[in-house]
Image (cartoon, rainbow, N blue to C red):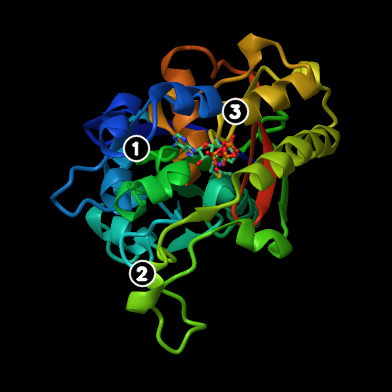
C-alpha cells in the first residue's frame, strides 16, 4: 500500500531578531505582559527594506529540505504552499516559489487555511500521493506578517504575537506494508466564526476594495477577538485530538510527541493539561519564533528533529492546530 512519508524538512527565519524589549521601545507594551500571556520572548522579522516575500523565505527553507531529502528541484511533482500572507494578492506564492526553484511547468497551488494551512497542505499532499497524481510533493508553510501588522499602540494586542518564517516538508509516496506515514487526518472549518479572526480589506465584496476611510479604521490590519479564540481553542483542540486518535486506532500514550500550532503557549499548556500529556511529549518553540501561522507546525517539527528529539523509525507524532476560518484539524504521522 502507498504511504506518505517525510523525506526531509527545513526551516528558515529572516535575520532581524525582534525581542519583546525591542517592541516595548516602539509601542506601549512590556516583556512581562507579552511573556505572561503568550510565552513569546522574541520573533524574527524581515528586513525593513528589500521586499522580502513569503516565497523568498520559503525558497531558503526549501533548499535545506531538498538537501536533506536528497531531491533536486526537478524531482518535485507538486508544490503546495500554505500562507495567509502571499507575496502579492495573486498569483499565489506557490507559483512564485516554483519559478525561484528554476522549475518550468511543475504544478503549484496555494492553501489559504491560515494557522491550519500546514495540516490542510499535508492532508492534500497525502490525497494527491495516494490517488497516484503525484509522488513527490513539497509542502510549504511560509509567512511574512511583519509588513502587515499595526505596529502602534492601537494594534498592540495582535502585533506582539506574530513572527515571520518558513518551513518545508518533502513528502513522498512509498510502497510498504508497514503502518507508517500519514496515519489519519481530521480537518474542520466553521465559517460562522470567520469574524473573530480576520483581515478584512482589500475586499472584492466592496465596490471600492480599499478606501482611505478603511485604512484610517485599520481594516487592512488583522483583527482578533483574543478571548474568543482562546475559548474556542481550548475546547476544540482536545476534541479533534481525540477524533484523530480514534481515527488511527491509537491511545494518547502511543503518541511520542505532540506538535501543536504555536499560537500561544497558554493555549498549548491548557491543551496539555486537559489531555494529560507529560512535558517531554509536547514541543513548543513559540518562545523563540512567535506565531508564524502556516509555518509554525513544520517549523516546530524541523526544530525538534534537529535537536534529535524525534524522528526515529516508529516515532509517532500528532500535528494539531486551530486558526482563522475558523479552521482546525489534527494529523497523526509515524516515521518510517
Ligand atoms: N501590551 C500590553 N498591554 C496590552 C497589550 C500589549 N501588547 N495588548 C493588549 N493590552 C492590554 C489591553 O489594552 C487591556 O488593557 P485594559 O485592561 O486597560 O483595557 C489588557 O491588556 C487586557 O487585554 P485583553 O485583550 O483582555 O488581554 P488578554 O488577557 O485577553 O490577552 C491575548 C490578549 C494574549 C491575545 C489573549 O486574548 C489570548 O491569548 N488569546 C488567544 C488568541 C491567540 O493566541 N491568538 C494568536 C493568533 S490566532 C491563532 O494563531 C489561532
- Image quarter where the C terminus lies is top right
Ligand 1 shows up in the quarter that is: top right
On screen, residue 115 above or below 66? below
Q: Depth check: give the residue in front, 231 or 124.
A: 231
Residue 38 percent across, percent down from the top left: 52, 29
On screen, residue 35 above or below 168? above
* Residue under the image location 78 percent in, 33 percent down: 238
Q: Secondary structure at mark 1?
A: helix
Number of the label disc, if any, that sits on residue 259 = 3
Please say if the residues under marks 2 and 1 sit with CB atoms less than 8 Å apart.
no
Q: Residue furthest left?
A: 50
State yes or no: Cβ of the residue under disc 2 lies below 8 Å from any atom of ligand 1: no
- Image quarter where the N terminus lies is top right
Instruction: Between label 1 and label 3, give the one nearer the viewer.
Output: 3
Q: Depth check: give the residue in front, 336 or 159.
A: 159
Provide the residue designation for mark 1.
66
Amino acid at each position: 500500500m502507498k504511504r506518505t512519508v517525510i523525506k526531509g524538512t527545513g526551516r528558515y527565519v529572516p535575520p532581524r531578531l525582534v525581542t519583546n524589549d525591542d517592541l516595548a521601545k516602539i509601542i506601549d507594551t512590556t516583556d512581562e505582559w507579552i511573556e505572561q500571556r503568550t510565552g513569546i520572548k522574541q520573533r524574527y522579522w524581515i528586513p525593513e527594506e528589500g521586499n522580502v516575500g513569503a516565497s523568498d523565505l520559503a525558497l531558503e527553507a526549501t533548499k535545506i529540505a531538498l538537501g536533506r531529502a536528497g531531491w533536486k528541484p526537478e524531482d518535485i511533482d507538486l508544490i503546495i504552499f500554505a500562507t495567509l500572507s502571499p507575496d502579492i494578492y495573486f498569483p499565489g506564492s506557490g507559483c512564485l516559489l516554483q519559478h525561484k526553484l528554476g522549475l518550468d511547468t511543475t504544478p503549484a497551488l496555494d492553501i489559504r487555511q491560515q494557522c491550519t494551512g500546514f495540516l490542510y497542505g499535508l492532508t492534500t499532499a497525502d490525497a494527491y500521493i495516494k490517488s497516484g497524481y503525484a509522488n513527490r510533493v513539497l509542502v510549504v508553510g511560509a509567512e511574512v506578517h511583519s509588513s502587515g501588522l499595526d505596529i502602534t499602540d492601537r494594534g498592540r494586542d495582535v502585533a506582539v504575537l506574530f513572527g515571520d518564517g518558513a518551513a518545508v516538508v518533502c513528502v513522498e509516496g512509498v510502497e510498504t506494508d508497514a503502518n507508517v506515514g500519514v496515519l489519519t487526518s481530521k480537518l474542520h472549518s466553521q465559517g460562522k466564526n470567520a469574524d473573530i479572526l480576520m483581515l478584512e480589506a482589500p475586499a472584492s465584496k466592496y465596490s471600492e476594495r480599499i478606501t482611505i476611510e478603511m485604512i484610517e479604521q485599520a481594516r487592512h490590519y488583522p483583527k482578533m477577538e483574543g478571548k474568543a479564540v482562546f475559548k474556542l481553542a481550548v475546547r476544540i483542540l482536545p476534541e479533534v485530538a481525540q477524533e484523530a486518535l480514534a481515527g488511527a486506532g491509537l491511545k494518547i500514550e502511543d503518541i511520542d510527541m505532540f506538535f501543536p500550532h504555536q499560537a500561544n503557549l497558554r493555549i498549548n499548556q491548557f491543551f496539555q493539561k486537559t489531555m494529560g500529556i507529560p512535558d517531554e511529549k509536547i514541543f513548543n518553540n513559540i518562545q523563540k519564533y512567535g506565531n508564524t501561522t502556516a509555518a509554525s507546525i513544520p517549523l516546530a517539527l524541523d526544530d525538534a528533529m534537529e535537536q534529535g528529539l524525534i524522528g526515529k523509525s516508529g516515532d509517532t507524532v500528532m500535528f494539531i492546530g486551530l486558526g482563522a476560518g475558523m479552521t482546525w484539524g489534527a494529523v497523526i504521522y509515524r516515521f518510517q
